[in-house]
Amino acid sequence: MGLRQWIIDLLSRGEVPEADPDAFVDVGTVTMAEGPLTIETLREAGIDATMVEAFDAPTAITRARIMVRRRQAAAASEVLAAPRSPDGP
């Protein structure tokens, strides 16, 4: 890439790259105790979900980040926002 093209690329707005629909995105953070239960709730709803440990340094608490496929993120957010009964669905 030449200097001219680099300047043009720097000053142009460019196109927004398409996001990979199969990439995992973060839809929430819960306590480690709630993590497996949340993952199971999402899987029962047909959403491919996984959990990643996240250490919160200021509070020294390990939490669980809930990760889902980008194409399922909106549905996962709805499932997580829905009120849950302690007796079941």
Image (cartoon, rainbow, N blue to C red):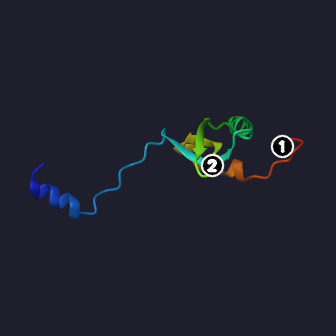
Identify the residue at the far right of this view: 87
Depth order, front residue of 60/18: 60
Depth order, front residue of 79/27: 27
Badge 2 amino acid: Gly
Depth order, front residue of 33/41: 33
Badge 1 marks a residue whose secondary structure is loop
In the rendered structure, the answer to whether residue 70 lies left or right of residue 6 reads right
In the rendered structure, the answer to whether residue 2 lies left or right of residue 30 reads left
Percent across and percent down for residue 63 are 65, 43
From the viewer's perspective, is the residue at label 1 or at label 2 nearer?
Answer: 2
Percent across and percent down for residue 8 are 17, 61
Q: Are marks 1 and 2 in contact (CB under 8 Å)?
A: no
Q: Residues within 10 Å of mark 1 (few under 14, many from 20)?
A: few
- Which comes before the other along the chain, label 1 or label 2? 2
Badge 2 marks a residue whose secondary structure is strand
Percent across and percent down for residue 37 are 74, 37
Quadrant of the rendered structure where residue 10 is? bottom left
Quadrant housing the C terminus: top right
Percent across and percent down for residue 12 are 23, 63
Q: What residue did someone put label 1 on?
A: 89
The residue lying at 49 percent from left, 38 percent from top is 22
Q: What residue did someone put label 2 on?
A: 28
Report the Cα–Cα distance between label 1 and label 2: 20 Å
Give the label on residue 74, or none.
none
Number of labels in the image equals 2
Note whether 25 is above or below 8 in the view shown.
above
The residue lying at 48 percent from left, 40 percent from top is 23
In the rendered structure, the answer to whether residue 46 lies left or right of residue 14 reads right
Q: Residues within 10 Å of mark 2 (few under 14, many from 20)?
A: some
Note whether 8 is above or below 36 in the view shown.
below
Badge 1 amino acid: Pro
